[in-house]
Image (cartoon, rainbow, N blue to C red):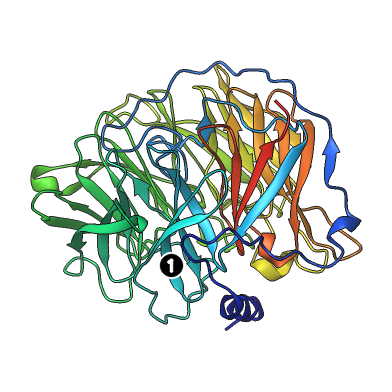
Amino acid sequence: MTRVAGILGVLILAWAAVAGVPPVPIPEGPDANSVPAFLGSPAVPQRIPAPRIPQHPFMAPNGRSNVHDDAYMTDTYVGSGPLGRTPEARSTFQAAECGSVTFDSAGRIVTICVGVEGPELVLIDAQTLETEAVMPLPPRSPSGTSVFSDFSGGGYFYLDQLDRAVIPTNNRQIWVVGESASLAGPGFTLVRTYDLSSGVALGDGIVSVLPDWHGLLWFVTVHGVVGTVEPASGALAVLALDGEAIGNSFAVDETGGVFIVSDHALYRFDAGASGVPLVTWRETYDRGTRLKPGQVNFGSGTTPTLMGCRWVAITDNADPRMHVLVYRRAAAVSGSRLVCTEPVFADGMGATENSLIGVGTRSLVVENNYGYSGPTVTENGGTTEPGITRIDLGAGGCRTVWTSGERVPSTVSKVSLGAGLVYTYTKDPEPNNTDAWYFTAVDFRTGQTVYKRRAGTGLGFNNNFAPVTLGPDGTAYVGALGGLVQIRDEQP
């Protein structure tokens, strides 16, 4: 067990969330008030015009369904988020990282909190942060893989159109878990399980599961298995990508396309007879020469992002500079499928392990995670390389619009179309070892930092690849090693 895992293990023995008990804040580091609570000034909303993302018929409403917000994996919200008007920071200590955050039809948080003791499905009041229900999920088998960099078995899940959590588990199954109610209060009920063990080898991990536009369940595994499950019968079909690994989720569109990136290539799959996964096209990219600090896989670290009805975007892992790549996603095209490529960040110091943000049909935002090899990197005043870049796609190809010097160790940043802001989670280099983490708003148009609100200090507030999430009322949430952080304006 690593030093960080040992610290979190002690916290688990000290306290664990119990349903019906008011939240306990994540413990702060020493001298928490020695750094500013707020920097900058309140934002003036500037709406970004963009077409609506199609609503997936088998997923919860856009913005509520999964870690990347919708089936296109755009990481954008239609509504506004916190504008920095006397923002308050609160937290709930779960002794586990609550990464993927979704919202049921009642506005409650449905999340999976992953700790060294195993993952749990948790129902949380979005306003008070009180834990309302907890359901243990299958624990991870000892494999030597770090709990801080393996997203299989609960790092990704989605909420369906019936408020059911559809979860890839650590015992090679997919669980469908519904909500229940009784005199004792809210709860969870296991509705159905799908056994994938005949197609997924022992020791492999299921990274993500999503439905296509016809309701067929698709899944991917760490060792490069792409599979489908017919929901009614449970019939399983798989295709193994020889010598390739998968570390992230994937995207689906209304034409039936399923877009998956391995550590070697970007794919479009479509379902064949009996749901068999068929490779419609495959495009290799420059996977570079090394696994860079800040990456889980030796290759692209991005979940594919769909833009409008034509494009799909990822990053490569090239040296000396990584690139943003935009492709035509149709099943058949004339000419080159690659539309454009744009280098980002400094030579030898660029890597990302998080999905691109797709804003409308022409803009992408990419962040630099280079240097984040684990939680210890950001302790004792440490941090990672700077960089958030906006890229626009035009008639002449891709071009860099701006680059921010903010440092984003590992969060999945988001864009609010209503506010015109990029929301991220930053950590500056510090001489006093306070280790302050800030919820940060960047102007989408200019790249200038608008404001920063201190979320907390110390190890418990390290987000470790968890996203920024906006709730239906515009409240922001950030998963952290200690649990879940809430940021909301106190003034209208």
Q: Is residue 431 left or right of residue 473?
A: right
Disc 1 secondary structure class? strand
Residue 60 is situated, as x and y percent measured from the top left of the image, at 35, 37
- For disc 1, the marked residue is 119
Q: Is residue 239 left or right of residue 302?
A: left
Image quarter (top left, top right, bottom left or bottom right) of the C terminus: top right
Residue 293 position by quadrant? bottom right
Residue 395 is situated, as x and y percent measured from the top left of the image, at 54, 16
Note whether 96 is above or below 3 in the view shown.
above
Q: Nearer the viewer, residue 480 or 134?
A: 134
Q: Residue at x 58, y 19 (%)?
A: 396
Image quarter (top left, top right, bottom left or bottom right) of the N terminus: bottom right
Residue 444 in view of the camera? yes
Note whether 390 is above or below 132 in the view shown.
above
Q: How many marks?
A: 1
Residue 240 in view of the camera? no
Q: Residue at x 84, y 63 (%)?
A: 434
Label 1 crowd bin: few (<14), some (14–19), many (20+), radius 10 Å: many
Q: Amino acid at mark 1?
A: Pro
Furthest-front residue in this view: 183
Residue 143 position by quadrant? bottom left
